[in-house]
Image (cartoon, rainbow, N blue to C red):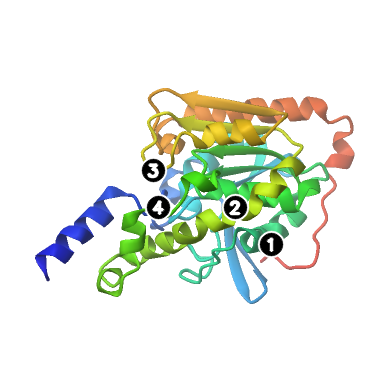
Amino acid sequence: MNKHLYLILITLTSSGLFGCDPPYESDPKNIFQGQLPQYKTYSLNNRSIHFAEIGRDNAGVVIFIHGTPGSWHAFAHYLADTDLSQSLKMIAVDRPGFGKSDYGKLVPSLSEQASLLLPLLESYDPGCGVILVGHSLGAPVAVRMAMDFPEKVSALILIAPSLDPDLEAPKWFNRLAELGAISWLVPSELMYANQEVMVLQDELTQMLPLWDLLDLPIIVIQGNKDNLVDPANADFAEQKIRTKLKVVRVDHGGHFILWKQPELIKSELVELVETQNKSIKDRKNCNEKTLIGFTIH
């Protein structure tokens, strides 16, 4: 191998600058001490969407959305948390093109991803909306779902989110990775992540007129030492979200606070759920669920 190409490859793959979440790994069932998640899929528009589900029926619903690359495994430790699973219904999905959701068959459009994940909202919405938790590139997917289907989403938790189009322009290494001489050297999961990053700025730009439509509680958790997603994305959230916004800035937190500081994430989630429960006057009606238009198996 040409030594210059080798040095470029080492720089790209070791820096972690392509994406945000670890690639799909073996089943992490060993971390579940009691109840194991159920694995389910549904089909929509000739696509297969895979997800893991655990927790109580007739309870508040939380759907976790991973970054890029990655899979539902990014949230496995949250699903394995017995405090959460005994109180909530939790779902962690493989985004289109990742994990077991047609791996490699990407859907770079955030609006199309939102539409492909709509069946989860339709199936699990207890009548008063679900909470969406998105990490990194999973955060704008969650935001887009709230923009497009506001009646189905009750709140958002955005962790190290990519939100500001001015901050998400492709970097030199993203463009370099697209070159034929380089692309065939890069692991597939990183190339898929890079393809999403290359179009992210345009996707976020399309969302700019829609921010004023949001009217729901939103929590942004941002590490001030994040080297992958600019911490100024939290500033963007403060500028765009006029009401019901809480920004948690973690002084020494990096991009991976999702895994390094899980108790912080859990604490914010529990507080949000408790606040929402107090605001629901008729819990019985809220818990009436209806399957709409597709089959989960």
Label 2 or label 1, whichever lies nearer to me, is: 2
**Sequence-first tag of 3 and 4:** 4
| Residue closest to the eye, 26 or 23 | 23
Tell me whether the residue at label 3 lies in contact with that at label 4, contact meaning CB atoms closer than 8 angstroms: no
Q: Which mark is residue 289?
A: none
Marks 3 and 4 sit apart, C-alpha to C-alpha, by: 8 Å
The numbered disc on residue 228 is 3
Q: Secondary structure at mark 3?
A: loop
Task: Please tell me whether mark 3 or mark 1 is closer to you in this view.
Answer: 3
Could you say which is closer to the camera, residue 169 or residue 241? 169
Disc 3: CA contacts within 10 A as few (<14), some (14-19) or many (>=20): some
Q: Amino acid at mark 1?
A: Ser
Q: State how far apart marks 2 and 4 are (Cα).
A: 19 Å
Label 2 crowd (10 A; few <14 / some 14-19 / many >=20): some
Q: At x 43% / y 34%, what residue is drawn?
A: 257
| Residue under label 4 | 19
User: Residue visible at 60% across and 35% down?
Assistant: 237
Above-or-below relation of 75 to 95: above
Q: Amino acid at mark 2?
A: Thr
Q: Position of residue 32 (x, y in %)?
A: 48, 44
The mark nearer the N terminus, 2 or 1, is 1
Assess whether mark 2 and mark 3 are in contact (beta carbons under 8 angstroms).
no
Quarter of image, res 273? top right
Tell me the distance, in whole angstroms, between the alpha carbons under discs 3 and 2: 20 Å
The spot of residue 157 in percent (x, y) is 61, 37
